[in-house]
Amino acid sequence: MARYTDASCRICRRENSKLFLKGDRCYGDKCAFERRSYPPGQHGQRRSKISDYGIQLREKQKVKRMYGLLEKQFRSYFEKAESQKGITGINLLILLERRMDNIVYRLGFATSRNQARQLVRHNHFLVNGRKVDIPAYLVKPGDKVTLKEKSRKIGLILESMETVARRGVPSWLEMDKDNFSGQVLSLPTREELTMPIQEQLIVELYSK
């Protein structure tokens, strides 16, 4: 599958928002967005007026890149959110948060969603005792995510679990560090999704 392979820090600068794509690096002095908070390229520091369409497009690109999705995948989530009852924008965010790779990241087993995606693909986790190696798998309330016994000595995972306090575990999830597991207590509410996202702009873009 096609994936973005250029420098991740360029994405944050392009979207004018810290997306935490590089794990711990994003919290330190080496964060490229903190050092150069303007778009990449030779014309990055020029001021330019952005149209309403441009603002909507940038918001969609930001969220798509935050969760590491391709356009076709993201559009599919939007269509699913649109078909559900409730507010389309909030439905979209909840669907994205329910992804297995995002849950692994939120629980603190990985320092970034990209790292979490790799761990899921390499078959390190169980959901309710069953193997799940699909990053796009959607968890539901009551599901228990457990790190496999043979994976509990992997340094990368242990280091991430030690630093999870820096960003915290969302209130709709529960982490049990002693048993290397976490549980989905409920679906997140909009108030619990604290990322700087204006989902209505995405709805307006796709509704044209």
Image (cartoon, rainbow, N blue to C red):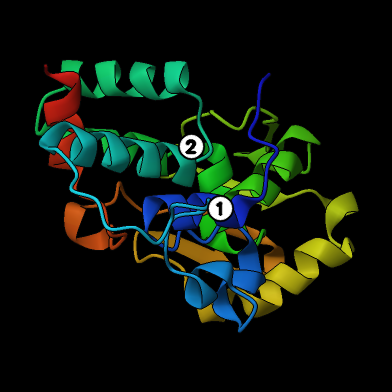
Residue 203, above or below 188:
above
Q: Residues within 10 Å of mark 2 (few under 14, many from 20)?
A: some
- State the residue in front, 125 or 60: 60
What mark, if any, has residue 10 been given in the picture? Answer: 1
Residue 99's label in the rendered image is: 2
Q: Residue at x 58, y 57 (%)?
A: 9
Labels 1 and 2 touching (C-beta < 8 A): no
Q: Check disc 1 and report its element: helix, strand or loop.
A: helix
Residue 60 at x, y percent in the picture: 31, 36
- 84 sits to left or right of 107: left
Q: Mark number for residue 200?
A: none
In depth, the one of 175 and 65 nearer the eye is 65
Report the residue at 24% width, 24% height from top. 81
Is 134 placed above or below 47 here? above
Amino acid carrying label 2: it is Arg
Quarter-of-image position of residue 92: top left
Relative to 136, residue 21 above or below:
below
Instruction: Please name the residue shown 39% across and 65% down the image.
Output: 170
Given residues 141 and 27, the one toward you in this image is 27
Name of the residue lying farthest toward the bottom:
29
Task: Let me know if residue 90 appears in the view.
Answer: no
Residue at 64 percent of width and 72 percent of height = 24
Q: Nearer the viewer, residue 30 or 163?
A: 30
- Residue 205 position within the rendered picture, expressed as x and y whole percent measured from the top left: 17, 26
Q: Quadrant of residue 16?
A: bottom left
Q: Of discs 1 and 2, which sits in the foreground?
A: 1
Amino acid on which disc 1 is placed: Arg
Q: CA distance from mark 1 to mark 2?
A: 24 Å
Is 171 above or below relative to 149? below
